[in-house]
Image (cartoon, helix red, strand yellow):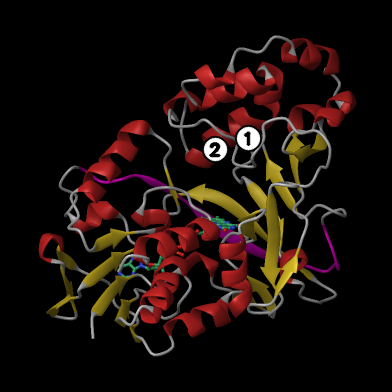
Amino acid sequence: MKKALIIGGGFAGCTAANLLKQKGFSVTIIEKSDVLGGGCRTFFYYGHPYTYGPHHLLVDVGDIHVWNYMNKYLKLRELKHYNMTFVGRDNAFYTYPIHKDEIELMPDKEKVHEELKDRPDVSTARDFEEYWTYSVGETLYDKFINTYSKKMWKIKNNKMLDEFTFSPKGVALKTGSKACFEGKKNVAYPTEVDGYNSYFEKCVEGCTVIFNTSVEKFDIQKKKVWVNNEWMTGDVVVSTISPDMLFNYQYGELPYIGRDFLKVILPIERITPEPYYFIHYANDEPYTRVFEYKLLTGYKSPHTLIIIETPSFNNKLYPYPIMSEINKAKKYISELPATVFSIGRMGKYHYDNMDVVIKDCMRLFEQL
Ligand SMILES: Cc1cc2nc3c(=O)[nH]c(=O)nc-3n(C[C@H](O)[C@H](O)[C@H](O)COP(=O)(O)OP(=O)(O)OC[C@H]3O[C@@H](n4cnc5c(N)ncnc54)[C@H](O)[C@@H]3O)c2cc1C
């Protein structure tokens, strides 16, 4: 029987384990923590379920492969995804992505309309700042994006983000429905109170999982990793950790920004106004987002859990959209031997949602 060795038992490691097992591999997973699921795992705080960062399943409309795959393992509840932003200079909450109709509510609407005329061609934008100012003009950029982005990435200048040609919410200036991704993505969440956890368990049924174990050393050209005082190997090795680690940081370390998550239970059934459950803070407050979890998880309680997210370097969550760093990651990945795959949020050094991780696993392992 062919062997697969997987580093990291997060969403990517578990999905890889499941698909490789179905291909007849005997699978071993090495996981640093004592649980599976990484950032997508549901934990509980005084009964309230939460994940580290809200984790809607977002699937392109019409992508039946990913949709059917997840539906095989979890009962999914479809949702509408509504965000708002607090804009301090207007002392107002507006829908995010910026909605064209809400410009009418702004004290400086004439200026905003003026700036929206004759925008430069956004396809010529060279960086994040140009992408946004070309798309929505200086005033809207300053209200919604400028400070938020500098805070989110802990940078002084948004021009540093030079690999940025899209809005994370799919559109810079919205018309029509105020729900995010409307008509573009199906948005869903598991009905089970523990979210995706049962999926992770099913993925690793029949596999060997070594918990509380970090991979310490790598001889990746020989497909060997040093674990618990011995070299381990596989016919296929799947890494979901940062590719610089596999090469002992030979070309330098890849930078990431992380998040601190502050949990707060409030003595009220619901805190965010219908239909919103996500608030962005685009001003000089230290936090970027506040999220009300029960509206995603469906948890019933007379109280509510919010989590306040503050950017930090305490963990590695978001790869920087900076060309030189992306090229460094590509160099590492290009030097991997043929049957070593580097997948997932860190493995690809690319912010990928869960649907992309599933698609990557389906594509990469198809030929094995
Ligand atoms: C704040 C936030 C919000 C998000 N929201 C969404 C969303 O709404 N929808 C969506 O689809 N996606 C969302 N994502 C993306 C989603 O989290 C990723 O697609 C997914 O986590 C990728 O899985 P992964 O296995 O690559 O990483 P992770 O889930 O982070 O798993 C990595 C695993 O590797 C383990 N590990 C790390 N180092 C080692 C080591 N040296 N040895 C062994 N094990 C190790 C970790 O303990 C962890 O279990 C969000 C991400 C963030 C950061």
- Count of marks overlaid on the render: 2
Residue at x 34%, y 73% (from the top left corner):
32
- Crowding around mark 1 (Cα neighbors within 10 Å: few <14, some 14 to 19, many 20+) is few
The image shows residue 360, relative to residue 7, as above or below, that is above
Secondary structure beneath disc 1?
loop
Residue 355 in picture, x, y percent from top left: 54, 59
CA distance for labels 2 and 1: 8 Å
Q: Residue furthest bottom?
A: 206
Which residue in the structure is indicated by mark 2? 151
Q: Residue furthest front?
A: 367
Residue at x 39%, y 76% (from the top left corner):
17
Which residue in the structure is indicated by mark 1? 284
Residue at x 60%, y 28% (from the top left corner):
146
Name the residue type under label 2.
Lys
Whether pointer 2 and pointer 1 mark residues with C-beta atoms closer than 8 Å, the reply is yes
Q: Quadrant of the N terminus?
A: bottom left
Location of residue 136 by image quarter: top right
Q: Quadrant of the C terminus?
A: bottom left
Name the residue type under label 1.
Asp
Residue stretch in magenta: 252-271
